[in-house]
Amino acid sequence: MPEIKEVIVVEGRYDKNALRQVVDAVILETSGFGVFNDRQKQKLLRALAEKRGLIVLTDSDGAGFVIRNFIRSCVDPRWVKHAYIPDVYGKERRKSNASKEGKLGVEGMCPETLLEALRRAGATIVGEDQAERRAPITKTDLYRLGLSGGEGSREKRLALLKALDLPEHLTANALLDVLNAMMSREEFISIADSLPRRAE
């Protein structure tokens, strides 16, 4: 089982249980929106982020992104990596109904998908060589390739998200962080150039 250096932050205990089957790591729950009013947990997140780094792994629905953005606002972004699960529609086995948006959460993902999400985020896996530094993908690259700031950029960005199996709620800025963790600038340009002008 891979050992992850960073502390992984998830929404709840079922997410934590699913992740414990995949990696050896310190896993902390936000208790859903409970973290918003829990000053002690916020302080703990900041302390752990400075000491070991955080990886935020929330569901790909709107609520997951609200929690993710809250953590972004209260923890120095230098110490935070963001892992994203793909948009997969269905319902978890323990639930009688699907979520409001109909998407599976972290607990519903297969182990391979969870590990891949952590790798894409740039998780530090003990015993594995870390990727060498490379030229970053920039906001200028997103603009030049039609993924932000122009007519049809939202549609092209959605096509890229779909091609990379990333959630649709990802903003252009969050996409930039993910792309830099996942691939080289050359790989990104090649993928972006192959996208259709408009999403189907």
Image: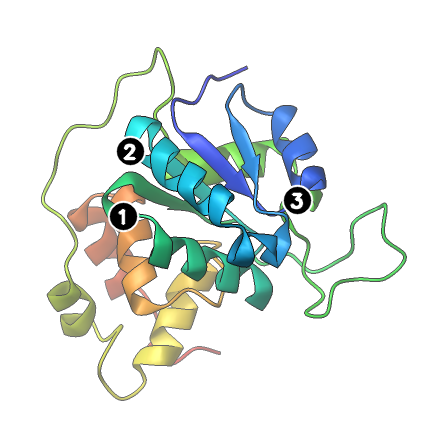
**Local secondary structure at mark 3:** loop
**In-image side of 65 versus 189 (left or right):** right
Asked whether the viewer can see residue 62, the reply is yes
* Amino acid marked by disc 1: Asp
Q: Position of residue 161 (x, y in %)?
A: 42, 62
- Residue identifier under label 3: 12
The residue at the point 33 percent across, 15 percent down is 128
Q: Position of residue 144 (x, y in %)?
A: 14, 72
Out of 48 and 105, give the one closest to the viewer.
Answer: 48
- Residue identifier under label 2: 50
The residue at the point 50 percent across, 43 percent down is 41
Q: Is residue 143 above or below residue 176?
A: below
Q: Position of residue 24 (x, y in %)?
A: 53, 18
Q: Are marks 2 and 3 in contact (CB under 8 Å)?
A: no
Q: Residues within 10 Å of mark 2 (few under 14, many from 20)?
A: some
The residue at the point 38 percent across, 32 percent down is 48
In space, the residues marked 1 and 3 are separated at their CA atoms by 22 Å
Q: Position of residue 86 (x, y in %)?
A: 54, 53
* Amino acid marked by disc 3: Gly
- Residue identifier under label 1: 76
**What is the quadrant of residue 149 in the picture?**
bottom left
**Local secondary structure at mark 1:** loop
Q: Are marks 1 and 3 in contact (CB under 8 Å)?
A: no
**In-image side of 38 versus 75 (left or right):** right
Earlier in the chain: of badge 2 and badge 3, it is 3
In space, the residues marked 2 and 3 are separated at their CA atoms by 23 Å
**Of all residues shown, which one is farthest toward the bottom?**
151
**In-image side of 81 versus 142 (left or right):** right
Q: Are marks 1 and 2 in contact (CB under 8 Å)?
A: yes
